[in-house]
Amino acid sequence: MSAPLGKTAVTEPDVRVWDPLLRLCHWSFALLIPAMWWTAENSAWGWHRRLGLVLLGILVFRVLWGFVGPQTARFASFVKGPGTVIAYLRGQMADAATRIGHSPLAGWSTLALIGAMLLQVGMGLFSGDPYDGMTGPLNPLVGVMTADMLTDWHETFFNVVLGLICLHLAAIVFYASVKREDLVTPMVSGDRPPMQGVTGIGPVPWLRAGLAIMLAAGFAIWIAAGVPPLG
């Protein structure tokens, strides 16, 4: 139906789904994980250590942002109980038509991937051999046998991280090919097509963002220094 004579048709605005800091975290993971794999495969241990500390800082920020960020960044908005996940899989979610952000199933996938990356980085902080190449900044805090064990686990556990990434990519392909839902474009632009009665996430809490960035960066720097005593 055309607009009445003399009036302009009003189109609904796009819905803001993802804030810029969350998107920056997401794409940083997509760049850092392959880069860290490449540096490990090519024995570029200095860069591997630096990138690992950068990844640690971003992961810590993402965890903090999961408590103080906008709606769709918060864990409480997408980490749901088994009943909600089952209702989603059965197509019985009451708010499915107006829901933005991660689905309950994708929420657990996201949480698993963040947890796996934290565990992988955590093991890397203690790994290495001080007599044969690069070590993590916390290697002096553990014995040689513990460091050797964590080094082996660090190498093996990367396959778990890789598997979770492959599941993540498979889900994106499934949604695009089967459900005809584009998940990539909103993660680039932050917006998705209009939804009736949905206004989006609103403004970014930049003061809380600044505090979270400083805490995450300070923690990564403290770890890089070998956790010296505070005060």
Image (cartoon, helix red, strand yellow):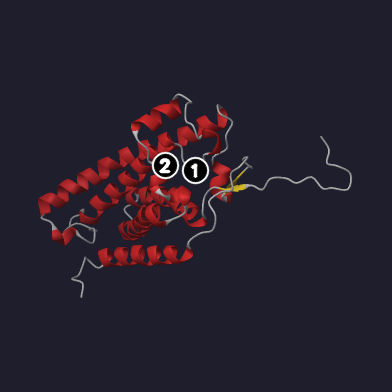
Question: Residue flagged by tag 1: what amino acid is it?
Answer: Gly
SS category of the residue bearing label 1:
loop
Q: Which residue is mark 2?
A: 78
Pick the residue in front: 207 or 121: 207
Image position of 92 with respect to 125: above or below: above
The residue under the point 49% across, 43% down is 101
Tell me the quadrant of the picture where the N terminus can be found: top right
Q: Which residue is mark 1?
A: 101
Side (left or right) of 198 relative to 230 = right
Question: Mark 1 near mark 2, Cβ–Cβ under 8 Å?
Answer: yes
Tell me the quadrant of the picture where the C terminus can be found: bottom left
Q: Position of residue 130 (x, y in %)?
A: 17, 59
The numbered mark, 1 or 2, whose residue comes first in the sequence reads 2
Q: Position of residue 75 (x, y in %)?
A: 38, 47
Pick the residue in front: 122 or 114: 114
Image position of 130 with respect to 36: above or below: below
Image position of 114 with respect to 84: above or below: below
The residue under the point 83% across, 38% down is 2
SS category of the residue bearing label 2:
helix
Mark 1 crowd level (few <14, some 14–19, many ≥20, 10 Å Cα): many
The residue under the point 26% across, 40% down is 156
